[in-house]
Amino acid sequence: MRAGKFAASAAALIAGTLSAYAEPSETLAPCLACHGATGQSEVENVPSLGAQMASYSVIQLFMFREKLRVAEPMNEPAKGLSDDELQSMADALAALPAPKPPAAGDPARLERARALTERNRCRASPTSARTTC
Ligand code: HEC
């Protein structure tokens, strides 16, 4: 897909966010089996999605659906979902509580993480497990 067409589709998707909402609870259940019903993932290598900005999630879901972002565990569940379903899922994820920051752990590992975030000019959030770049 051309970048312009993608931007137009993404804009249309975002513009559609204020319209119809599908009931998310049922459709979201299989998602939360991986991502955690409390917003905090208990599964290794599966991101926590609680309190994630809906605008971010909906774009990721759109990209998974269109295979513009390739990740096997996500392309499959996103397949065939309507724009409205993507939006209501993103809204429901945003309404979940934010994941807790990890408990202080292995100092060597924390130091490696600190060096990595510095190298990539990211800042760790003082209030959540999220990092902004
Ligand atoms: C089998 C486990 C599994 C299921 C089921 C699943 N996901 Fe995911 N999800 C993942 C993994 C793993 C990733 C990270 C993909 C990667 O490595 O890029 C991910 C990534 C995401 C992201 C992007 C997160 C980010 O930080 O960029 C969103 C949003 C998301 N999933 C929402 C959902 C929704 C909504 C559903 C249900 C339709 C769902 N997931 C179902 C495993 C799963």
Image: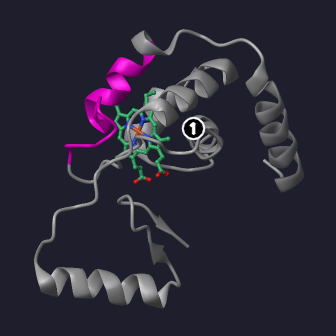
Residue type marked 1: Leu
Q: Is mark 1 within 8 Å of ligand 1?
A: yes
The residue sitting at 42% across, 13% down in the picture is 25
Q: Is residue 39 magenta?
A: yes
The residue sitting at 83% across, 31% down in the picture is 15
The residue sitting at 21% across, 44% down in the picture is 43
- Using residue 24 as the reference point, say whether residue 102 is left or right of it: left
Q: Position of residue 82 (x, y in %)?
A: 65, 19
The residue sitting at 41% across, 33% down in the picture is 96
Q: With respect to residue 29, does 106 lie above or below?
A: below
Most extreme residue toward the front is 127
Q: Position of residue 120 (x, y in %)?
A: 50, 84
Query: Which corner quadrant of the image does residue 45 belong to?
Result: bottom left
- Using residue 103 as the reference point, say whether residue 74 is left or right of it: right
Q: Position of residue 115 (x, y in %)?
A: 35, 90
Given residues 74 and 59, the one toward you in this image is: 59
Query: Which corner quadrant of the image does residue 128 belong to?
Result: bottom left
What segment carries the magenta color? 27-43
Count the marks: 1
Q: Is residue 40 magenta?
A: yes
Question: Label 1: how many residues lie within 10 Å, few (<14), some (14-19) or many (20+)?
Answer: many
Given residues 35 and 107, the one toward you in this image is: 107
Most extreme residue toward the left is 106
In which of the image's four quarters is ligand 1 placed? Answer: top left
Pointer 1 residue:
61
Q: Position of residue 102 (x, y in %)?
A: 22, 61
